[in-house]
Image (cartoon, rainbow, N blue to C red):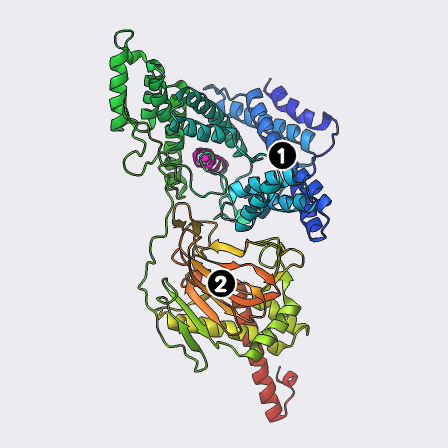
């Protein structure tokens, strides 16, 4: 019987009929972007709409196959032969999922998508291209919906905000978020009705929001059942026992499932989840039911809330009040919290216990957030019977390391090392911390020479996996590293003297930054990039976006929470940054510092040849670049670290090349002096 169960799903793999494969959404998206730069706007619409549909179908297929196969092969372990039973179920589910997905999607290898593309779909970037394409074809209703969908996840995007206002003046189409989550919409609608004291309607929406939340939780967990990987493992050399491998993979899945709480309570484009999101459904419901006279359900919801916050004094008082109202009709002790809430919190606590045990046993670190944290007293104190205020649902990201201050002594004003370098402004003038503006770091001739190098060696999308417009569709981005420049020099495609100039000026900038900020230790290169941003012709009308959005260099800027979270995928090891400008003959492109709200500009600096801006890389220095609306803006972008473990690998290779060149020059000079052929010395 066991072998029959194992054999059947594998047989299905070979018997299923061929079906039309789902087109990979990343290829469709790439086709749409290419069409955008050809000004083929109908092709943009066709390709990106298909990409969005493919993306949705792919997710739906994965969820339905995984849940369906789990239901088809339930895990029913018995003490006898439990290991064989477990293996049988796992193998059966695996074959079932593979057969199910391949029958609907085609070859699964075609749907392996880069993290960059996944991130762009998560941030709704395709809708930015769509809204412009629809506008170009005068399809304003569709442009309005696409722009609104993008804007909901990117509320700081000034250009789309302005576009949306323009579209609305010419279109009667309602604002529709094409990617909205029904449970989140119901929750916010319930809040509005609650604020208006329309409690009957509010109850309906809060109840619908709860049902939708738990359905979304099931889907979120199913999406965790795919491939997993611990970043610190070298899988080529990975050797582990059967149980270690199973434990590693299972715990990664469990952590992913456990943190669905955060994902489901985070609004599009935000880093911070809505504070206390799930428990608040029960909190608002308990008071709403009280106001409509349903004291039994009010008590039930209040007890459900206490599962998450058992010490909440206000709700404990409400429970006592409700029990007093009901004691003549039933025993209040018979009223239990809602079953789904009890099961949810029981599973949550068990998962937490298992993860912490695994962290100790397997030797990995896991800092669990307090998923139900509330900041101080409850803001919506729903005391019976008089209080009916809304809570402040401003996001709070729990359990992450916020950047509060720089953990080293802050000094500045050290020597500039080179006579020609001119001090312009310090941190005080630039309204911030650890900031400096210098001029004459390089000469006009050196600027022109480096611009010439840039025109020959920079590649579109370099540093951004070939994406020609990583920050805005209105500009082309090109870049090159020091090592690439030296390679071009060796190949004779640029003068070696010019290639070496790139190396030398970046080293000069490093020494100046290290000296000016009076660092007690060496400053190492983390990344060096020669970059040019070019305004695209025909794309500059009514531009309000940024050439490079406001960000911090070593943490994830969260303007809504007014914090900067020092965690992956940020380059947390970067300590100082600098920009050395090569020209100023373009329109726009000013470098700006802002407050952590990413809106309040504290300093604006116009680039010009030889100008350097240096600053510490953390959340104390949010910065960005205003739109380049005409011409090309070039600069040497530099990031530094105080930790030698994170030195730039290409820079170390470039150092070797330079040492080799210097040795060759020395050998050649010595050979000429002594009239010796260098080969004769070998």
Please provide percent x and percent y for residue 28.
69, 43
Res 24 quadrant in image: top right
| Mark found first going from the N terminus, 1 or 2 | 1
Nearest the eye: 262 or 302: 302
Indicate whether residue 294 is drawn in magenta. Answer: no
Residue nearer the viewer, 665 or 197: 197
Q: Which residue is mark 1?
A: 58
Q: Residue 140: image x %, image y %?
A: 65, 41
Q: Is residue 189 above or below residue 603?
A: above
Residue behind mark 2? 591
Residue 354: which quarter of the image? top left
The range drawn in magenta is 246-263
Q: Residues within 10 Å of mark 2 (few under 14, many from 20)?
A: some
Give the structural element (helix, strand or loop) at label 1: helix
- Classify the position of the C terminus by image quarter: bottom right
Residue at image coords 52%, 70%: 581
Residue 202 image-quadrant placement:
top left
Residue 492 at x, y percent in the picture:
68, 74
């Amino acid at each position: 019987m066991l072998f029959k169960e194992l054999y059947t799903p594998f047989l299905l793999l070979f018997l299923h009929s061929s079906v039309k494969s789902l087109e990979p959404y990343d290829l469709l998206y790439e086709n749409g972007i290419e069409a955008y730069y050809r000004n083929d706007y109908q092709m943009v619409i066709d390709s990106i709409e298909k990409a969005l549909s493919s993306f949705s179908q792919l997710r739906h297929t994965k969820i339905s196959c995984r849940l369906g196969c789990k239901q088809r092969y339930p895990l029913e372990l018995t003490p006898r032969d439990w290991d064989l039973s477990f293996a049988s179920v796992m193998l059966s589910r695996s074959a079932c999922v593979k057969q199910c997905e391949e029958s609907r999607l085609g070859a699964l290898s075609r749907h392996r998508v880069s993290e960059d593309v996944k991130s762009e779909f998560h941030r709704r970037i395709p809708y930015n291209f769509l809204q412009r394409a629809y506008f170009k074809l005068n399809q304003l209703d569709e442009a309005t919906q696409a722009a609104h969908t993008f804007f909901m996840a990117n509320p700081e995007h000034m250009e789309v905000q302005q576009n949306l206002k323009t579209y609305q003046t010419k279109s009667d189409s309602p604002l529709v978020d094409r990617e909205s989550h029904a449970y989140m919409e119901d929750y916010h609608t319930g809040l509005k009705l609650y604020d208006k004291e329309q409690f009957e309607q509010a109850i309906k929406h809060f109840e619908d929001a709860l049902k939708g939340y738990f359905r979304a939780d099931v889907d979120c967990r199913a999406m965790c059942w795919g491939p997993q990987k611990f970043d610190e493992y070298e899988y080529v050399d990975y050797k582990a026992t059967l149980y270690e491998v199973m434990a590693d993979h299972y715990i990664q899945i469990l952590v992913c499932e456990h943190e669905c709480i955060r994902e489901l309570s985070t609004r599009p484009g935000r880093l911070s989840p809505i504070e206390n999101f799930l428990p608040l459904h029960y909190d608002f419901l308990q008071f709403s039911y009280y106001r409509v006279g349903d004291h039994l359900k009010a008590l039930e919801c209040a007890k459900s809330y206490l599962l998450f916050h058992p010490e909440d004094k206000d709700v404990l008082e409400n429970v006592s009040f409700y029990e007093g109202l009901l004691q003549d009709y039933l025993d209040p002790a018979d009223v239990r919290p809602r079953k789904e809430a009890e099961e949810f919190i029981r599973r949550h606590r068990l998962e937490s216990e298992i993860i912490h045990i695994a962290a100790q046993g397997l030797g990995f670190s896991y800092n669990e957030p307090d998923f139900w944290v509330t900041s101080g007293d409850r803001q919506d104190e729903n005391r019976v019977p008089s209080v009916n205020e809304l809570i402040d649902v401003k996001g709070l990201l729990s359990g992450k390391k916020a950047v509060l201050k720089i953990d080293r002594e802050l000094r500045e004003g050290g020597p500039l090392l080179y006579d020609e370098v001119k001090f312009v402004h310090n941190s005080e003038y630039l309204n911030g911390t650890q900031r400096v503006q210098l001029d004459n770091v390089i000469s006009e001739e050196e600027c022109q020479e480096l611009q010439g190098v840039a025109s020959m060696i920079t590649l579109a999308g370099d540093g951004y996996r070939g994406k020609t417009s990583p920050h805005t569709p209105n500009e082309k981005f090109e870049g090159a590293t020091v090592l690439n420049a030296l390679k071009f020099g060796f190949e004779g495609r640029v003068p070696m003297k010019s290639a070496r100039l790139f190396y030398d000026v970046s080293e000069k900038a490093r020494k100046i930054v290290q000296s000016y900020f009076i660092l007690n230790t060496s400053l190492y290169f983390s990344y060096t990039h020669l970059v040019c941003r070019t305004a695209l012709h025909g794309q500059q009308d009514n531009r309000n976006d940024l050439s490079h959005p406001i960000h911090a260099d070593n943490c994830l800027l969260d303007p809504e929470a007014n914090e900067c979270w020092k965690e992956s995928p940020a380059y947390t090891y970067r300590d100082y940054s600098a920009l050395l400008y090569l020209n100023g003959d373009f329109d726009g492109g000013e470098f700006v510092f802002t407050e952590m709200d990413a809106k309040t500009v504290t300093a604006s600096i116009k680039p010009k040849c030889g100008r350097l801006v240096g600053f510490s890389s953390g959340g104390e220095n949010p910065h960005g670049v205003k739109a380049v609306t005409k011409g090309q803006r070039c600069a040497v972008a530099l990031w530094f670290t105080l930790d030698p473990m994170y030195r730039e690998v290409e820079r170390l290779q470039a150092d070797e090349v330079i040492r080799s060149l210097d040795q060759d020059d020395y050998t050649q000079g010595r050979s000429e002096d002594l009239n010796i052929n260098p080969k004769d010395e070998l």
